[in-house]
Image (cartoon, rainbow, N blue to C red):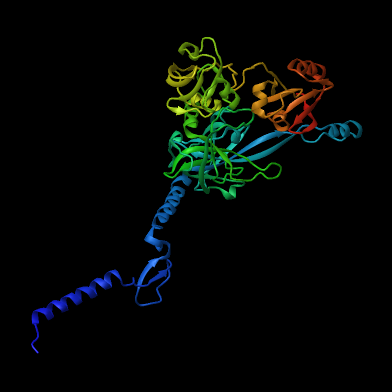
Amino acid sequence: MKIDIKKLVIVVVLLAVGVYLGGTFLGKDPEKVVVYENTKPTQDSGNFVKASLLSNKNKSASLQYLNQAFVNIAENVKPSVVTITAEKVVKRNMTEQDEFFRKFFGFPAPDSESRQTSLGSGVIVSDKGYILTNSHVIENGEKISVRLASGEVYKAEIIGSDEKTDIAVIKIEAGDLTSVRLGDSDALKVGEWVVAVGSPLTEQLAHTVTAGIVSAKARSINIGGNTTASFIQTDAAINPGNSGGALVNIEGELVGINTAIATGGGLSRGNIGIGFAIPVNLAQKIMEDLIETGHVERAWLGVMIGSITDPIARAMDVDTRTGALVNEVVEGSPAQKAGLKIGDVIIEYNDTRVEHPQHLTSMVSSSDIGEKAELKIIRDGDEKTIEVELGKRPEDDELTSGEMDTSSEELLGMKCKEINPQLAEQLEIDIDEEGVVVVGLKRGTESAQKLRHGDIIRRIGKKTVTSLEDLKEGYEQVKDKQYILLLIKREQHTVFITLENE
């Protein structure tokens, strides 16, 4: 039989190509053997990969990059974060029992003063030794010490402090300092990764690094009677001692100063995933003023503003529930000169949406005096844009966002107002409650220790309180006494407390 050589060659070539293609597309991949770092393979053959990189479609390599990003943040930011200790003298209030034993048994009065040390954190913002922290960290401190990440300890000088924003600047004389890079807190997005660095609970836990996300922005909370800051909320673990520490973004840039936490109350003072930081854009403005002049000069718009509640929005026939409603325009203020009117709803400030009245207050405070700001407003159902040249806030200005009634009484380190619809809504109290409500407390006073913002004072001495006039009359009756008795209502409980009359 005669063999066709040409056909045979073609068949062989086709078979070879088929075997090659079959092995390439239909064959199984060689078995991958997982090898952990620092572990030698137990086989002489096979493909070896790190376990951390082995996954479907090899997507988890990005987790390695994220992991390394956090490592880099910790390495770069920790040298810029310091531990602050402040020694202060605390005055002890003599109780009625102490006085009784002193009078009738001749026992000496107990020591009325003691020395305490408070713990906090701070962030180096300049190689010249300037450190940004909270004012409550260094409040009343007679001796302030700063411990660097390297372990060196320096005595610090207070440059300035601003209680309204809880920002303070201190300074140390030291060389080779690593300052943090400042970021842009306005650019932060909810859901972004952030890292908190500080000294929670004790010096032994200095430079603790925790991670979380930005839970919310423009949060308005009350600290010591002040609601001027518009806070960043985060679930990165923050605990007592973290105050004044750094909140940084994924680039390792400072975006906030850790300041406060929400707790379970009572003995539960630890982290529950709700922490607050002062935005760095606001902190930077305050810091620059404190360094340059030792005090803060704030920009001023000159309006009394309130919230846009659902009933107000329906009554005004507006769609928004955010923004700030103009309740009053101060005569001669920048707002009046620009043409703002009562009933205007301010919805944007320099292209940033206004979340609530305190948010607008915070943005104005972060601006420069003389700056021309652009406001987007709703007036009679139409949107308009108004340009305002910001002025300097008067020193004696006590305008409070969201409250039309500015009449108040200050005594015993507390500021009180009569209950009005705005306060009742803001503090979630019954408009028919009898008494006056505490809206401000002076730091360092006994009132600040025993009272809370929102407490209702129902009686002073033997005088029942239904108005500010009653409060003043009652105080006149007891102002010569060493201890002043107050009956207060807090939430659903009514209790008596005493305040020493200094």
Residue 158 x, y percent position in the rendering: 55, 31
Q: Nearer the viewer, residue 120 or 374?
A: 374
Q: Nearer the viewer, residue 163 or 89?
A: 163
Number of marks in picture: 0
Q: Is residue 93 left or right of residue 131?
A: right
In this rendering, does residue 440 appear at all?
Answer: no
Q: Is residue 155 above or below residue 411?
A: below
Residue 129 x, y percent position in the rendering: 47, 36
Residue 314 x, y percent position in the rendering: 57, 24
Q: Nearer the viewer, residue 258 or 144?
A: 258
The residue positioned 66% from the left and 24% from the top of the image is 423
The residue positioned 41% from the left and 69% from the top of the image is 35
Q: Is residue 158 above or below residue 200?
A: above
Q: Is residue 157 left or right of residue 433?
A: left
Image quadrant occupied by the N terminus: bottom left
The quadrant where residue 458 appears: top right
In this rendering, does residue 267 appear at all?
Answer: yes
Q: Is residue 193 above or below residue 102?
A: below
The quadrant where residue 357 appears: top right
Which residue occupies the extreme front position in the image?
A: 1
